[in-house]
Amino acid sequence: MAAIGTAVLSNTISILMWVYSDPRPVRAFVGRCRDSPPTDPRSPQRQLVTNSTKSLTSVGEAKPGSEFEGRLDGDNISLLSGIGQSAALSAIGILATLCTLYFAASLLVPIASAILLSMLLSPTVEYIMRVRVPRVLASAIVVLLAIGLLSAGIVAVAGPARSWIEKAPDSLHKIERMLVALKAPLDAIKQTTDQLREVTKPGGGVEPQDVHVVQPAFTDVVLSGTPQVAASIISVIILAYLLLVSGDVFLRKLVTVIPTFRDKKRVVEITRQIETDISFYLLNFTLINIGLGIAATLLTFLLGIPNPMLWGVMVTVLNFVPYIGALTSIGILTMVGVQTFDDLPHALAAPAIMLLLIAIAAEIITPVVLGRGLQLNPVAIFIAILLWGWLWGLVGVLLAVPLLASFKIICERVQPLHPIAEFLTS
């Protein structure tokens, strides 16, 4: 699939570059429209000619009945070919960007993760610095505290997670037994299919052999990518720490190369606003997800489901992916409830209550905490999840919403990008 995608992208870029470098086909097409416009007034070409003539008449460059009537002059041909070149160049830029994001994922994923992590932790660093702690020490304290919490969480849930993954097939069989009444029609269809297969089976033929594909063990799959994952995590930690230590060094360097004081002031204001809004969004979005995780932990503990901390961590992480993450959490909690309880009402209690809590968080708590201005368009969210998931895999799915929110905040603060921000707003 990657080779096919690469071939399609390269061929598309080649065609667009040919259009950009040689506009003669566009000129030839427009020239045919000019020399022999169709007589049918409903024809698209005739409408193009008529609209162009009206435009020229409105600006005083042509008059009705003149030689421009029903024709396109050389300036319009150049204008249309220029538009075609501009569109081709824009498409080339978009495709080149997608290719870069896809093939440079191993480099760009740690950088993007480190930037978002530094923006998430920067308010805590600023708070510690208020008590006259140096930035280097405050950054180290915050990073080490974050590493400690993440390590403790991973150690706490690693064992239970592996145990539940091994029990997943048993959960599916138990669900099948609970839904045996719904399975009866399917069994009748299967029996009929088997009978037809026996009737149409050729006699004297060689019996087909069963082929069993041996899947690698879960631990083998996890451990096979451990060196790469460890290197990426170390890179993210080091880069995030350096970004926290640097503070506004890059902003000061940027200000020094801007010529006028007015532009310097404007750049500082926009940059400060973008940093503040992104940090505010990431911090509160993370706190809301942690709150949902705590609620899931208490819920599963009160219902008597084993390993409640595991389900709290799962809900916290998956809720970074709106809609899809919530559905995944509900599905997993349903399987866990079926594995834990023998009757269906008790098994569905945890996913039902969790669905209600997620809906309350999404529709009431999040708008109140973040404000309506930072709400994202659901269509844009879903497209971003698909796009970043295709580019960067599972990490891209988790980073899709933070990246989209950061891009929207930047568009809001930069005047030419306001239309994009309006589209991304809920």
Image (cartoon, grey):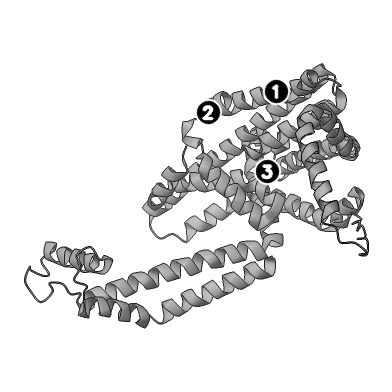
Q: Residue furthest top?
A: 302
21 left or right of 113 in image? left
Question: Residue 88's spot in the image, x, y percent?
Answer: 43, 70
Residue picked out by circle 1: 352
Residue picked out by circle 3: 135
User: Is 287 above or below relative to 383?
Assistant: above
Q: Nearer the viewer, residue 371 or 319?
A: 319
N-terminal-most mark, 1 or 2: 1
N-terminal-most mark, 3 or 2: 3
What is the secondary structure assignment of the residue under circle 2? helix
User: Is 104 above or below relative to 416?
Assistant: below
Q: Disc 1 and disc 2: Cα gap in Å? A: 23 Å
Q: Nearer the viewer, residue 74 or 411?
A: 74
What is the secondary structure assignment of the residue under circle 1? helix
Q: Which mark is residue 367?
A: 2
The structure residue drawn at horizontal position 60% and vertical position 23%, both measured from the top left corner, is 360
The structure residue drawn at horizontal position 79% and vertical position 28%, both measured from the top left corner, is 179
Give the amino acid type for the residue marked by disc 3 in the picture: Arg
Instruction: For label 2, count other residues whose C-alpha is less than 10 Å away and answer few (under 14), some (14-19) or many (20+).
Output: some
Give the amino acid type for the residue marked by disc 1 in the picture: Ala
